[in-house]
Amino acid sequence: SQKIEQNSEALNIQEGKTATLTCNYTNYSPAYLQWYRQDPGRGPVFLLLIRENEKEKRKERLKVTFDTTLKQSLFHITASQPADSATYLCVGTGGFKTIFGAGTRLFVKA
Amino acid sequence: EPEVTQTPSHQVTQMGQEVILRCVPISNHLYFYWYRQILGQKVEFLVSFYNNEISEKSEIFDDQFSVERPDGSNFTLKIRSTKLEDSAMYFCASRGQGGQNYGYTFGSGTRLTVV
């Protein structure tokens, strides 16, 4: 079946370090991948979108890569801050079909 | 910044009752969606809506569910005869014409509790 998989274990890092979150997809060829932030009890908030013909995209402290050979996207937060603590969702879209990953919880310690 | 507005924020209903969840998408957006998230689980797609009709629906979106855009601004999700397992956060989302360049804008959700 088509899947978007993210690390289910929480990621704990120290403030100021770079957080790297991984998203893998199987049996699926998304035309683009999106990354969202979700805080408890709230709706997802859009962060970045990268298309299959793009290798990398940046926005302020955020960077996302898309490797169609590895079937993987990496999401980086540089100079992380405690306010970056949240769950980050990887979302794949191909045609009209959109699949959400389960999310990775990030904790940034001061 | 434009927002997607959902009401109510929390709805408690008895099993078997009908509920209507309401959403006001961003005014110039053309694509509308309903998602649900059961507590502690991943976000699941329910239905997409474009040009006044359903463009895709998931296997979750069975005959007990329906969507409407009654007046050009509201977008509603009706659950006809609620079951305990329908308890979840329901999120409405919308996106604009250049959809492939932009993500979805989600509302804050309606927490539905079926008792």
Image: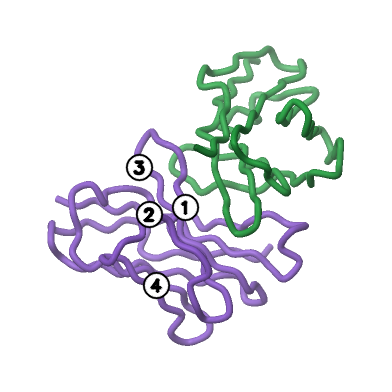
Chain colours: A green, B purple
- For the residues marked 4 and 1, what is the alpha-carbon distance in whole angstroms? 14 Å
Residue at image coords 35%, 66% = B21
* Nearer to us: label 3 or label 1: 1
Q: Quadrant of residue A4?
A: top right
Residue at image coords 50%, 33% = A102
Q: Quadrant of residue B37?
A: top left
Chain hosting mark 4: B
* Nearer to us: label 1 or label 2: 2
Q: Which residue is mark 3?
A: B38
Q: Which residue is mark 1?
A: B45
* Nearer to us: label 3 or label 4: 4
Q: Which residue type does callout 3 highlight? A: Ile
Work out whether A39 lies above or below B32: above
Of residues B11 and B44, which is closer to you in this image?
B44
Q: Residues within 10 Å of mark 3 (few under 14, many from 20)?
A: some
Same chain for the residues under marks 3 and 2 in the image: yes
Secondary structure under the numbered disc 1 in the rendered image:
strand
Chain hosting mark 1: B
Secondary structure under the numbered disc 2 in the rendered image:
loop
Q: Which residue is mark 2?
A: B59
